Amino acid sequence: MKKIAIFASGSGTNAQNIIDFFKKDTSAAVSMVLSNNPKAIVLERARRHQVQTCVFDRAQFVSEAGVLKTLQSYDIDFIVLAGFLWKFPEHIIKEFENKI
């Protein structure tokens, strides 16, 4: 099964729809939701579905030892951007080429 990480910053309605979809379609699963906003409602939506969450700041996002290592530790296959507006660092784009 493929593992999906969703990046979101707000209420998470799109993330919720993706989580719901893959509860029925077992070809993949949402393994984690990541956010740069510790108050984002998407984090609570994820927790209600027993999806791992991760909150990060800009320094962790741009550091090669930060968010990328978290994604690798969960063996993430694909990244979905659902209302996430920060520009992705080149090292994450290279690691997940054609998978974002």
Image (cartoon, rainbow, N blue to C red):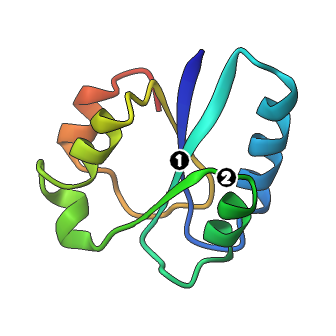
Find the residue positioned furthest to the bottom: 39
Name which residue lies at 39% across and 63% down.
Answer: 86
> From what the image shows, is residue 39 above or below residue 26?
below
> Gap in Å between the C-alphas at discs 1 and 2?
9 Å
Helix, strand or loop at mark 1: strand
Question: Mark 2 is on which residue type?
Answer: Gln
Q: What is the number of callouts on the image?
A: 2
> From what the image shows, is residue 90 above or below residue 76?
below
Name which residue lies at 79% across and 61% down.
Answer: 13
What is the x, y in percent for residue 49? 74, 53
Is residue 39 shown left or right of residue 94? right
Quadrant housing the N terminus: top right
Do the CB atoms of the residues marked 1 and 2 lie less than 8 Å apart?
Answer: no
What is the x, y in percent for residue 22? 77, 31
Question: Mark 1 is on which residue type?
Answer: Met
Label number found at residue 14: none
Name which residue lies at 48% across and 80% down.
Answer: 38
Name which residue lies at 47% across and 33% down.
Answer: 100
Mark 1 or 2, nearer chain start: 1
What is the x, y in percent for residue 28? 66, 22
Circle 1: is it few (<14), some (14-19), or many (20+) Cα within 10 Å? many
Is residue 11 shown left or right of residue 53? right
Circle 2: is it few (<14), some (14-19), or many (20+) Cα within 10 Å? few
Q: Mark 1 vs mark 2: give the one in front.
A: 2
Query: Mark 2 highlights which residue?
Result: 50
Find the residue positioned furthest to the right: 24
Helix, strand or loop at mark 2: loop
Query: Mark 1 highlights which residue?
Result: 32
